[in-house]
Image (tube, rainbow, N blue to C red):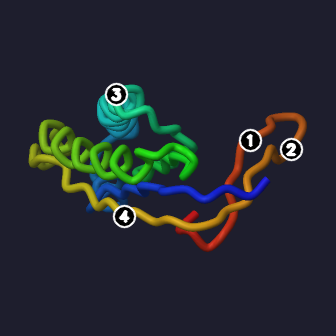
Amino acid sequence: MVRILYAPYTDIASFTSMCGQVPPHRVMAFLNDLFTTFDQLVEKHQVYKVETIGGTALSVTEAVDPLHAHKVFAFAADMLEAARCVMMPGTGQPVRLRVGIHSGPVMSGIVGRKMPRFCLFGDTGV
């Protein structure tokens, strides 16, 4: 199935270097705090969380929703604000989050049988 979507993609600045400086249990606790906050924003803005890998996250909304662009922008703005309230382990500084918003066609589907995953493929930043 081909969809047109708006996809906010986030990345935590200095995440890789932070992982080398703090114990893994602190990295996991930090990510859980941050992404639990983002999950609440996913519900608030009615977007779909596709994936979280390490310090990155991808969420989408379909263009069939007449408010799709507004939802994605508001979601991204709220993510930036929420990230400032979470502190980086090791430095105690607020999280610096990079957010990119892309739109365009993608192919979506389920890949695999043993541990199937919903995947998006295409040139729309995914």
First along the sequence among labels 2 and 4: 4
- Cα distance, mark 4 to mark 1? 23 Å
* Mark toward the start of the polypeptide (2 vs 1): 2
Percent coordinates x, y for residue 72 in the rendering: 38, 49
Separation of disc 3 and disc 1 at Cα?
Answer: 24 Å
Could you tell me which secondary element the residue under label 2 belongs to? loop
Q: Position of residue 28 (x, y in %)?
A: 39, 34
Q: Amino acid at mark 3?
A: Lys
Q: Are marks 2 and 1 in contact (CB under 8 Å)?
A: yes
Few, some or many residues within 10 Å of mark 2 (<14, 14–19, 20+)? few
Tell which tag, 2 or 4, sits nearer the viewer.
4
Which residue is the site of mark 3?
44
Q: Secondary structure at mark 1?
A: strand
The earlier-in-sequence mark between 3 and 2 is: 3
Quarter of the image with the C terminus in it: bottom right
**Residue type, mark 4 in image:** Gly
Question: On the picture, is 7 further left or further right than 110?
Answer: left
In this rendering, the answer to whether 9 lies above or below 77 is below
Lower sequence index among marks 3 and 1: 3
Q: Which residue is depicted at the point 70% across and 50% down?
A: 119
Residue at the right extreme?
113
Q: What numbered label is drawn on residue 100?
A: 4
Residue wearing tag 1: 117
Instruction: Judge from the rendering whether residue 57 lies leftward or rightward of residue 64; answer left or right.
Output: left
Give the amino acid type for the residue marked by disc 1 in the picture: Arg
Nearest the viewer among 95 and 71 is: 71
